[in-house]
Amino acid sequence: DLPIEIKVADGLSVKQLEAALEVQLCGQYLRHETARHGILLLVLQQPRPGGWEIAPGGPLVTFAVVMEHLHARARAMRESAATGPQPIVCAIDVSGVVPLKDKRAAARAKRKSNTAKTGKSIKAPSKRRT
């Protein structure tokens, strides 16, 4: 078995992400002799323009810097005891993905704009079978 703790990172602080790694994944799921390896999977769904604060009062940093920080903490845990928890941290960043409905709306607006400029509607070529 390979425990995977999945968290949506959007609304979480760095302290909460650290707790997911150390308390939840390592402290709960990886405390048994048979479960040494595990994954903390973070999903970033929405961009966070303000960034994250790693240290209280510190500068705001990007998600990439937060991931580096968590990778370092996981590495330190792995290196502290060969027979202890061996966590890794992974991320799926979909914050830059444009939803399909937005893509379609943009395409409709573009077609409408082109039609208004030329006075002709643009139709897709017909598919004729011969």
Image (cartoon, grey):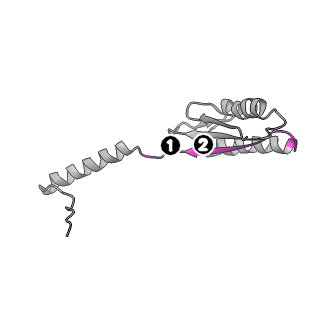
Describe the element under mark 2 as helix, strand or loop. Answer: helix
Query: Percent position (x, y) of residue 109?
Result: 25, 47
Picture quarter with the N terminus: top right
Q: Residue furthest left?
A: 119
**Residue 11 x %, y %:** 56, 30
Q: Amino acid at mark 2?
A: Phe
Q: Nearer the viewer, residue 118 or 102?
A: 102
Q: Does the segment drawn in magenta span residue 85?
A: yes
Instruction: Relative to 130, say whether 88 is above or below.
Output: above
Q: Is residue 122 magenta?
A: no
Residue 56 rendering spot, x and y as whole percentages: 68, 30
Q: Who is closer to the viewer here, 81 or 30?
A: 30
Q: Which residues are magenta?
A: 80-98
Q: Which residue is mark 2?
A: 63
Q: Quadrant of residue 66?
A: top right
Left or right of residue 61: residue 121: left
Judge depth for marks 1 and 2 and give the one in front. Answer: 1
Cα separation, mark 1 vs mark 2, equals: 11 Å
Where 120 sits versus 26, above or below? below
Crowding at dot 1, Cα within 10 Å, few <14 / some 14-19 / many 20+, comes out as few
Q: Which residue is mark 1?
A: 95
Residue 44 locus on image (x, y percent): 55, 40
Q: Residues within 10 Å of mark 2 (few under 14, many from 20)?
A: many
Q: Residue at x 69, y 32 (%)?
A: 20
Specify whether 35 is left or right of 56.
Answer: right
